[in-house]
Image (cartoon, rainbow, N blue to C red):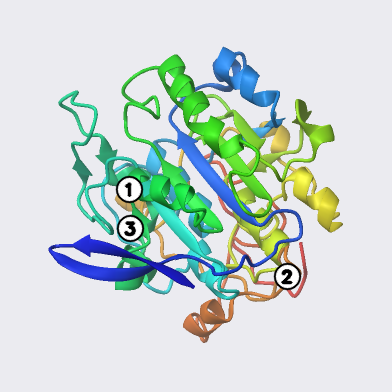
Amino acid sequence: MSRLSVTLFGLTFLTFASAASLVPGRAFDRFITIWLENQDYAKAAVDANIADLKRQGILLTRYYAHTHPSQPNYLAAVAGDYFGLNHDENVRVPEDVFTVVDLLETKNISWAGYFEDMPGPGYMSDASDGSTGNGGWDYVRKHNPFVSFDSINMKGEHLLDLQSFGAFERALAAKKVPQFAFMSPNMMNDGHNTSLKFATDWSHRFLQPLLADGAFDGRTLVMLTFDECETYGVPNQIVTLLLGSAVPPALKGTEDATFYTHYSILSTLENNWELPHLGRYDVGANVFRVVADQTGYTKNKDPENAPAVDNSVSYPGQLNNETSKRLPIPVPNSKLVGAGGQPILEAVRLAWAGKDGQTPYDGSGRVNDGNRNPPIYKRPAANSP
């Protein structure tokens, strides 16, 4: 691994910048996901910038966020559950809950989180004023899912991988962007404090260097997504685009009508790099078809309750701020086989050994959406999704 020096509190540290050589994936070698804020599918899909970007990639026409407000959707994408979270206040998830970071590290796949206007590596506070000069918060912790997990924030070397957009720009110029990059623009550029047009204007400009020929070594899949829709009480459908050199030329300008949620990010990574799984809702989530078609994955399906999905309300869980809806974190299902063809992450199995019990994670891909389709707890079965 090559390293970059970073300065924190007047001290200089070394942090991994990228692998000396890429860990090859089956359909892509790098995955970059960029998150925008709070827009309904019907409005965003006809935006001129989104339409122009679609000509360079694939529009996922049945992609759904999980709930409202923003923060639980970010947590879901990296941990395979949002544990009933129904607010944007600070939370801490216990150390025995693992994330995408732990999956990637089983194969030494480099990773980083990049957050615009983050004051310094591993910044843990609620927010920070940054570059916009609008008098409001530019960086916000609620859009940085990694710092909420004790399995990450208790490890200094992991905090050093949570950096600013400036660090991303330097890594891009040096062709040392990690193989997994999670990116959150500031509250102006993501559209939260501005508008759809402001966010997509920014996105169009920001993406052009990333989509240029030779921008990266290896095949790179770039995912532009919104965290949730704007209107509560509707199914929470959002625009998501897949772009980059990993998209076959024949698929540029096309649409994919497979059912996806933010959990599909995890299942797709697992499938691409043949990674273990977390034993949560990552198992059974559909793999992006552009990847599944190249890897021979044939288990994508519509969840049985997909026609009735309405992801507007969080289901009960430990992070819910209503006492009557607070439940223990469920036991991961160690009996499943994930989209990577692998068993559960060994660290998860060991951490939860002796805690076997009922679990909502059955690998079916069933969508849990608040009061309408709450999680169904059952004994884990020795089956695969």
Pointers 3 and 2 in contact (C-beta within 8 Å):
no
Q: CA distance from mark 3 to mark 1?
A: 14 Å
- Image height check: is 153 above or below 162? below
Q: Residue at x 38, y 70 (%)?
A: 151
Q: Is residue 91 visible?
A: yes
Horizontal and vertical percent for residue 167? 36, 50
Classify the position of the C terminus by image quarter: bottom right
- Which is closer to the viewer, label 3 or label 2? 3
Between 211 and 193, the one nearer to me in the picture: 211
Q: Is residue 225 left or right of residue 9?
A: right
Nearer the camera: disc 3 or disc 1: 1
Determine the secondary structure under disc 1. loop
* Nearer to me, 73 or 245: 245
Viewer can see residue 316: no
What amino acid type should be assigned to the residue bearing mark 3? Val
Reading the image, the residue beneath label 3 is 147
Q: Which residue is mark 2?
A: 337
